[in-house]
Image: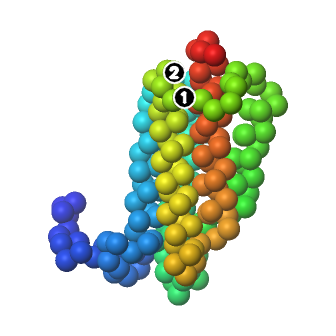
Amino acid sequence: MSIATKTGDDGTTGLMFNRRVTKTDLRIAANGACDELNAALGLARAWNEDPFVTEPLLAIQKELVILMGEIGCMAEDRDRYREKGFQFVEPAMVEQLTGKIEDLERNHKISYKHWATPGATKASATLDHARATCRRAERAVWAMREGGLPVSDAIATYLNRLSDLCWLYARWVETQAGVA
């Protein structure tokens, strides 16, 4: 089976359970932004060598797949989605991100004053890029909500918390590199 299905040649794309929507659908915009975020986190993982950063980023990338699956499921298919064994973003996932933020702020000496200018190191720049991409994904999710499409509070909060975590990881990486 080829990756080129040609089913999108008419300006539509697929959601879960063979549902078709236009490529400009708010769900597709949100999932596209989350897909970009996942790629940005992969880049950050490739440029950072410390498992303190890379291991949580890999786990987050896997959680983003769960998040994108939930976004790509129409409201009327949610029960079926769960019955098929698919997961939803849960508050516990948000709490894990919050815990990582609290750990960084309390237990790791991070040097920063005010806002940071991205690019002090290649590794931190990738994390800042992921943060900015995460903010775009967050805006797309809020646009879905404002457009009347179901988005859980957990998804919206998850993305907000993730952008904060990316910012802190970038500052931590800079601190480890001796950049003030």
Locate residue 152 relative to residue 30 in the image: left or right.
right
Spatial separation of the CA atoms under disc 1 and disc 2? 7 Å
Q: Say if 112 sits above or below 44 in the image.
A: above
Badge 1 marks a residue whose secondary structure is: loop
Q: Which residue is mark 2?
A: 120
Q: Which residue is mark 1?
A: 117
Residue 11 image point, x, y percent: 24, 75
Residue 54 image point, x, y percent: 55, 33
**Within 10 Å of the Cα at label 1, are there few (<14), some (14-19), or many (20+) other Cα atoms?**
few
Badge 2 marks a residue whose secondary structure is: loop
Q: Residue at x 51, y 29 (%)?
A: 118
Q: Given this view, does label 1 or label 2 mark the residue nearer the observer? A: 1
Q: Residue at x 55, y 81 (%)?
A: 148
Q: Say if 19 sits above or below 89 in the image.
A: below
**Residue 158 in sight from this viewpoint:** yes
Specify the amino acid type for callout 2: Ala
Locate residue 124 relative to residue 33 in the image: left or right.
right
Name the foreground residue: 76 vs 164. Answer: 164
Specify the amino acid type for callout 1: Thr
Q: Say if 124 sits above or below 158 in the image.
A: above
